[in-house]
Amino acid sequence: MSHGHHHGGNHADMLALKAELFARHTASLAAWLPVTGRPRTIVDLGCGTGAGTFTLLTQFPDAAVVAVDSSPEHLQRLKQEADARGLLARIRIVQADLDDTWPDLGTPDLVWASESLHHLADPHRAVQRVYRALPPGGLFAVIELNGFARFLPPDAPEFCPGVEERCHAVNDRKQAKELPHRGADWESTLTTAGFEIADFQTVDIHVDVSDDPGVGRYALMGLRSLREAVADDASSADLAALDELLDPDSPRCILDRPDLAVRTRRLVWAARRP
Ligand SMILES: C[S@@+](CC[C@H](N)C(=O)[O-])C[C@H]1O[C@@H](n2cnc3c(N)ncnc32)[C@H](O)[C@@H]1O
């Protein structure tokens, strides 16, 4: 869900919660990667609070991860978690703006960028830099979301059907200006930089609230931030409906809905330096 319009501690909370909700999907992604040999050094570009970092450390027991992000707050959260899991010795934390001069990333066998490339001002240059950092045969995993997660069925709620879709349509128009690389054609960016696409998959994610109560908290955060993003542009009827859905004291609150779920789609490229 997070696409750069959440700020502060709330964003770190949301990333951490999403990491938990999607942990199973992220683990099977890491297991699917067509790596050759056993990676020793892995870079997690735009690591956030460590959703990828911890998954990769589990999947590749011989590896150390260089975790890079520009947000001190996200990195602090990652460090606390690493400490709690006894994994600090296998992680090098690097605070850096990937639009600026790149830090020394060592000699990685695998670079992982999950929902981070579209945040960069010049992702094409970043992809070229990853290419140069990898040895021949090295793998670059690019994971991007196909749009924002949805939480309600398309025809819900009964008192204002389709409100979520309409607010996303409004938000998508704004986002097209703020994050022009969201939904970009990563395949052509990768091949232009010299990569070969070793494999590709789309992963449909659907987590029902009955399977994970974290869905309720995640949906509250996601729809609150959607509410903020469209506050000036959505219709007053839609804003009022969102307010009801988000009000824990209202009988119409999403937390009381058994049909609440997180639905989203991941696109994953495994690109190899020839
Ligand atoms: C949507 S989050 C994804 C985090 C993590 N990879 C995950 O899958 O949960 C995007 C991350 O990219 C980071 N980021 C955005 N712009 C960046 C930049 N210019 N340099 C480094 N990191 C950046 C943000 O701080 C944030 O942690």
Image (cartoon, helix red, strand yellow):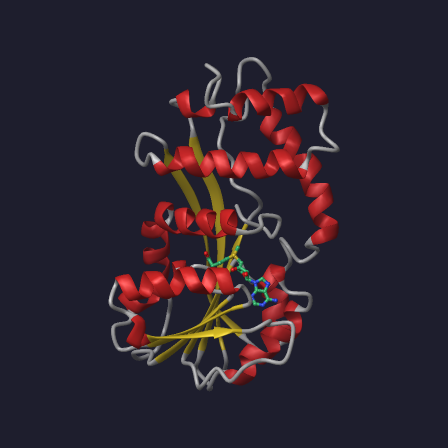
Residue 30 image-quadrant placement: bottom left
Q: Is residue 219 above or below residue 272?
A: above
Horizontal side of 45 relative to 5 (left or right) equals left
In-front residue for pair 58/14: 14
Q: Is residue 19 above or below residue 164?
A: below
Instruction: Residue at 32%, 65% (x, y): give it.
Output: 82
Residue 32 visible (yes or no) = no
- Give the percent coordinates (x, y) of residue 164: 59, 29
| Residue 170 shows in this picture | yes
> Which residue is depicted at the point 50% across and 38% down?
221
Residue 48's x, y, as percent? 47, 60
Say left or right for 160 vs 29. right
* Residue 12 percent across, percent down from the top left: 47, 52
Question: Count the marks: how many?
Answer: 0
Relative height, residue 253 to residue 183 (above, below):
above
Q: Nearer the viewer, residue 205 or 118?
A: 118
Residue at image coords 50%, 50%: 9
The front one of 28 and 198 is 28
Q: With 237 as the anchor, is 11 left or right in this view?
A: left
The residue lying at 43 percent from left, 59 percent from top is: 49
Is 58 drawn above or below residue 252 in the view shown?
A: below
Residue 191 figure quarter: bottom right
* In this picture, residue 161 sits left or right of residue 257: right
Where residue 246 appears, as percent x and y from the top left, is: 52, 26
